[in-house]
Image (cartoon, rainbow, N blue to C red):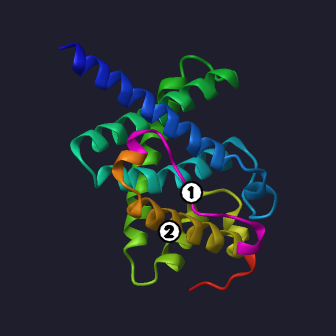
Amino acid sequence: MLAWFRQRTQDRQTAVDLYGAVVAEARRPLIFERFGVQDTPEGRAGVVIMAVFPVLERLKAGSPRARRVARLLAEAYVTDVDDCLREMGVGDMSVPRKVKKAAQALGERCKAYSAAARAPDPVSALATELASTIPGLDQAPAGANALARFALATVERLNTEPEDVLLAGRLAFAPLSADDLLETPT
């Protein structure tokens, strides 16, 4: 019985560690300064969802434990949204409704991003999805394409990582730099 509790606690900590890595990647100033994403709460939330997408994709395709960590990672996102809304002074009565909307956005966007990743031209399909869901990217097609290539490269990278690495809370994103804006879509 205690082993089950320890495993659950460890999985929750793994999800928190992975979420911390996702947020650190999503908060890189480069994304807002050079890629065209608006530095607003909506823009930051959109980039977090884009960055969590490859991690959820990899975990959902894994073992039962990996799928549990994926669920806990989604819960970490929802908890973070709740905390952020309260820090911004959103009234207590409207927080649950806004958190529910954010949780739905996570699920819907990840589903749309996953479908785009399987499209015949995944970079173009994902760039279109990103431009329609992340504020500012509709006016920055080069940024949308670069972020789509980044997300898809991260999906590929994570698919080659042993599951044990992710379940240890270690996460390596694909490289992202301002030079990625110069690349032409594939």
Q: What residue sits right under mark 1 in the picture?
A: 173
Instruction: Confirm whether residue 173 shows in the render.
Output: yes
The answer to the question of whether label 1 and label 2 lie on touching residues, with beta carbons closer than 8 A, is no
Structural crowding at the residue carrying mark 2, measured as other residues with C-alpha within 10 Å and reported as few (<14), some (14–19) or many (≥20): many
Instruction: Confirm whether residue 109 shows in the render.
Output: no
- Left or right of residue 111, residue 149 in this image: right
What amino acid type is highlighted by mark number 1? Answer: Phe
The magenta span reads 166-180
| Residue 161: image location, x then y, percent | 41, 58
Q: Residue at x 53, y 18 (%)?
A: 93
Q: Quadrant of residue 155?
A: bottom left
The correct choice, above or below, for 154 with respect to 146 in the image is: above
Q: Residue at x 29, y 43 (%)?
A: 67
Magenta segment's dominant SS is: loop
| Residue 121: image location, x then y, percent | 46, 83
Checking the image for residue 152, the label placed there is 2
What amino acid type is highlighted by mark number 2? Answer: Leu
